């Protein structure tokens, strides 16, 4: 079977992409608006963008469901304040992350709604998730409009890792981290690490 994605609707194409590009790490993004109102939302269109300078990228789509056609608070906040934090989600934080993904009104603090701690950052104003094993503080580099979505590129200015997940020598203990992965509309946890080539 082969499909011309130019000839199907956006939602159908999205299902094929999100079910094929898997598993995807989840960027749990904390930001603030001009009045200091906190926002916390997950995005699974997320990866490393540059090693020098260290940069991460997330892709933010338009609002869906009851907020269809609107611009997400995360995009508005990053565009106006130029700073944000990407928190890494492990399986232990799955329920909290899922709660923060709901379509709350803009005046709702998702940190409180999800029951997580807003911990002070070092180099940026938006707080990080205190319970997150790893957090990246970022300053906005640029936003690129791509069709209906916006690709946000940010420069990492500060990195946090809890001692339990740090092996030393700038290495992360992935077996202990157990990062949560996004698989279409489901999730996975990392199990059974191995190296290649595999022994028979």
Image (cartoon, rainbow, N blue to C red):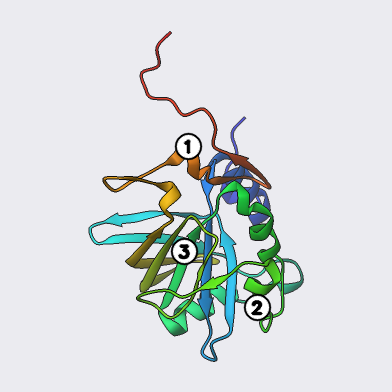
The residue beneath circle 2 is 109
The residue beneath circle 1 is 175
- x and y, in percent, of residue 112 in the image: 67, 74
Residue lying at the far front of the rendered structure: 163
- x and y, in percent, of residue 177 in the image: 49, 45
Q: Nearer the viewer, residue 144 or 91?
A: 91
Dot 2 or dot 3: first in sequence order is 3
- Asked whether the beta carbons under mark 2 and mark 3 sit within 8 Å of each other, the answer is no
Mark 2 → mark 3, Cα distance in angstroms: 17 Å
Q: Nearer the viewer, residue 107 or 49?
A: 107
Residue lying at the far top of the rendered structure: 200
Give me the residue at 39% from left, 77% from top.
124
Give me the residue at 41% from left, 52% from top.
163
Q: Quick one: SS at disc 3?
A: strand
Q: Quick one: SS at disc 2?
A: loop
Mark 1 crowdedness (10 Å alpha carbons): few <14, some 14-19, many ≥20: few
Q: Nearer the viewer, residue 188 or 47?
A: 188
Dot 1 or dot 2: first in sequence order is 2
């Amino acid at each position: 079977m082969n499909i011309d994605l130019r000839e199907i609707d956006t939602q159908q194409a999205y299902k094929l992409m999100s079910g094929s590009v898997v598993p995807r790490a989840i960027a749990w993004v904390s930001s603030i608006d001009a009045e200091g109102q906190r926002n916390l939302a997950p995005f699974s269109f997320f990866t490393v963008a540059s090693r020098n300078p260290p940069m991460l990228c997330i892709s933010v789509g338009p609002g869906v469901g009851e907020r269809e056609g609107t611009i997400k608070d995360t995009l508005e906040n990053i565009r106006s304040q130029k700073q944000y934090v990407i928190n890494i989600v492990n399986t232990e934080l799955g329920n909290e992350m899922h709660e923060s993904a709901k379509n709350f009104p803009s005046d709702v603090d998702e940190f409180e709604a999800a029951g997580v701690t807003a911990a002070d950052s070092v180099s940026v104003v938006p707080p990080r998730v205190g319970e997150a094993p790893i957090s990246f503080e970022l300053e906005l580099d640029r936003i690129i409009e791509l069709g209906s979505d916006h690709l946000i590129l940010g420069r990492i200015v500060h990195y946090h890792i809890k001692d339990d997940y740090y092996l030393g020598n700038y290495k992360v203990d992935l077996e202990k981290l157990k990062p949560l992965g996004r698989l279409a509309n489901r999730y996975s946890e990392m199990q059974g690490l191995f190296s290649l080539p595999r022994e028979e």
